[in-house]
Image: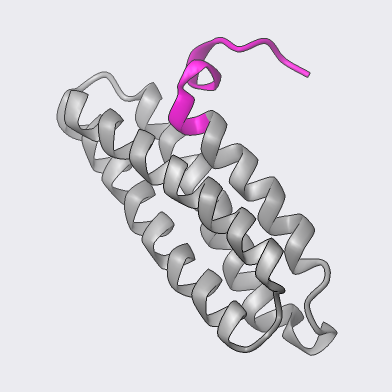
Amino acid sequence: MRNNSGYRKLIAWQKANLLAHLIYDITAKFPKDELFGMISQMRRAALSVCANIAEGYSRRGLKDRKHFYQMAMGSLTELEFFIDFAYERQFTGKDDYAKILEIHMETARVLSGLLKST
């Protein structure tokens, strides 16, 4: 594993990365007929949050950096919908849902702070 330098030192990226791993773990329990539906969509959205934070970090201009952080926030909001929908469809149990929401809210809070400070 690499050290915590570059974008890895950002708390927002660390939280998003944790969320992405959690999404992968939880979607592995989804019905297999959702492989190209909810599973794919949720995983792509979760990875998009991490990737956009990393790409934004690499941008020199504040406008570009902020743009990628905003895209990360958009993907995080998209993921929020998928998390709720998966719970409504009973693809996740109450405990997993609560765990995902907690990490999601932490990620949103920290990412919001990163956006404000940029």
For residue 118, say whether it is visible. Answer: no
Q: Residue at x 45, y 65 (%)?
A: 80
Q: How many marks?
A: 0
Q: Residue 18's spot in the image, x, y percent?
A: 63, 39
Q: Residue 115's spot in the image, x, y percent?
A: 24, 34
Which image quarter: residue 77? Answer: bottom left
Identify whether 70 is placed above or below 42.
Answer: above
Q: Is residue 3 magenta?
A: yes
Q: Quadrant of the C terminus?
A: top left
Identify whether 26 is placed above or below 91.
Answer: above
Which image quarter: residue 81? Answer: bottom left
8 or 85: nearer the viewer = 85
Identify whether 39 is placed above or below 2.
Answer: below
Identify whether 84 is placed above or below 26.
Answer: below
* Image: magenta residue range: 1-13
Q: Residue at x 59, y 67 (%)?
A: 42
Q: Residue at x 52, y 57 (%)?
A: 101
The answer to whether 106 appears left or right of 59 in the picture is right
